[in-house]
Image: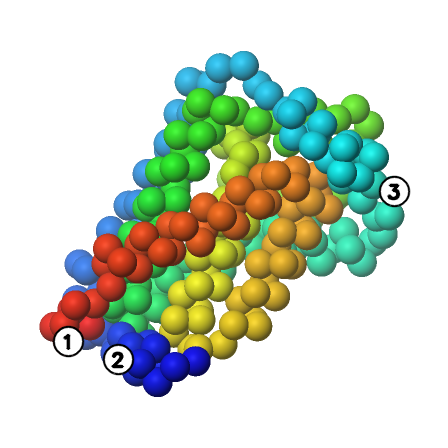
Amino acid sequence: MSADLRLERVSTCRPAGAAALAVTGIVPFLAAYAGYELARSAALALRGVIVYEPLVGIERRLFGEPLAVILSVHRNELLDIVTGIVYAVHPLYFLAFSLYLLYRCVGLFRSLLASFVIASTVATLVYALYPTAPPWIAIPGVSRPPNLLLELAEAILGSRVDPNPFAAMPSMHVCMATIFAYYYWRMSGRVVPGAAWVVLMAFSTLYTANHYLVDVVAGSILGLASCHVGWRLARPSSRQDL
C-alpha cells in the first residue's frame, strides 16, 4: 500500500459527534435500506416473464450440470449449518458495519451509503426488467437446505423474509459483501478478511441454491462498480467533511 493511500485511508477515519449521528447518517441510511426493500417488493408486482434458462444453460455448458444440482449431491449437515448462517446474517452484518463506520469514519460512511444506493437502484431495475427464478424454484429436484435462522425469523415475523423470490439476478448478498469488503479495506487497510467473506458468501449463495454462478459474478461486479462510483462521488473533500 502506498504512503498516499495509507494517509488517505487514515485521514477519513475520524469519530463523529454523537449528536450528529442520527441526522447525518442513521436516518438517511435506514431510509435508503427501507426504500430498497420496498422497491424489491414492487419489482415483484411489475415483473414480466420469469427467466432462468440462459443462466442454467451457462452452467450446463461449463460444468455439465447446474451447480445447484452438483452441490446438492455433496450436501452435509456441517455445510448446511455454516452456509445457512452465512446466508441468513445478510443484511444484519452489513447494517452493523455501516453504523460502526458511521461512528468511526463519517467520510467513509457517506461513500458507503452512496455505493449502496447506486447498487440497490441498479439491482431493483434488473429485478423488475429481468426477473430471475433462483435454482431452488427453477430446477426440478433441487431444494434449499434447512435454514433454522431463516425459519425462526419468518415464524417471528409471520411472513417470508425474502419479499421477492424472483430477485436472483444480480446477487445482492454478494454485492453487499463486496461493498463491505471494499470499505473494510478502506477503513483498516486489510484485504484478506473482506475477500474471505465475499468468497464465503458467494459459496453460500450457490450451495443453498439461491443463486446461479452468473448472479454471483454480476453481484461482485455491481459491488465493485458501485464502490468505485460511490467513492468518487462522496469521498471526503476536506476535513470538515470527516
Name the mark nearer the viewer: 1 or 3. 1
Instruction: Kindly state the secondary structure of the residue where label 1 is placed.
Output: helix
Percent coordinates x, y for residue 57 in the rendering: 71, 27
- Give the Cα separation between the discs numbered 3 and 2: 50 Å
The quadrant the C terminus occupies is: bottom left
The reply to whether the C-beta atoms of the residues labelled 2 and 1 are less than 8 Å apart is yes
Does residue 19 appear in this view?
Answer: no
Residue type at the position of mark 3: Val
Residue most extreme to the top: 49
At x 53%, y 67%, the residue is: 194
Q: How would you rate the neighbour count of disc 2 (Cα within 10 Å): few for under 14, some for 14-19, many for 20 or more?
A: some
Against 108, is 40 above or below? above
* Residue that label 2 marks: 11
The image shows residue 52, relative to residue 91, as above or below, that is: above
Left or right? Give the position of 70 relative to 22: right
Q: Position of residue 74 (x, y in %)?
A: 86, 48
Q: Report, in whole angstroms, how far the alpha carbon at label 2 lies from the one at label 1.
A: 8 Å
The residue to which callout 1 is attached is: 239
**Residue 48 at x, y percent in the picture:** 49, 15
| In front of the other: 159 or 147 | 147
Query: Looking at the picture, how far across and down is residue 83, in whole percent?
Result: 69, 54
Task: Name the kind of residue labelled 2 in the image.
Answer: Ser
Q: Nearer the viewer, residue 5 or 76?
A: 5
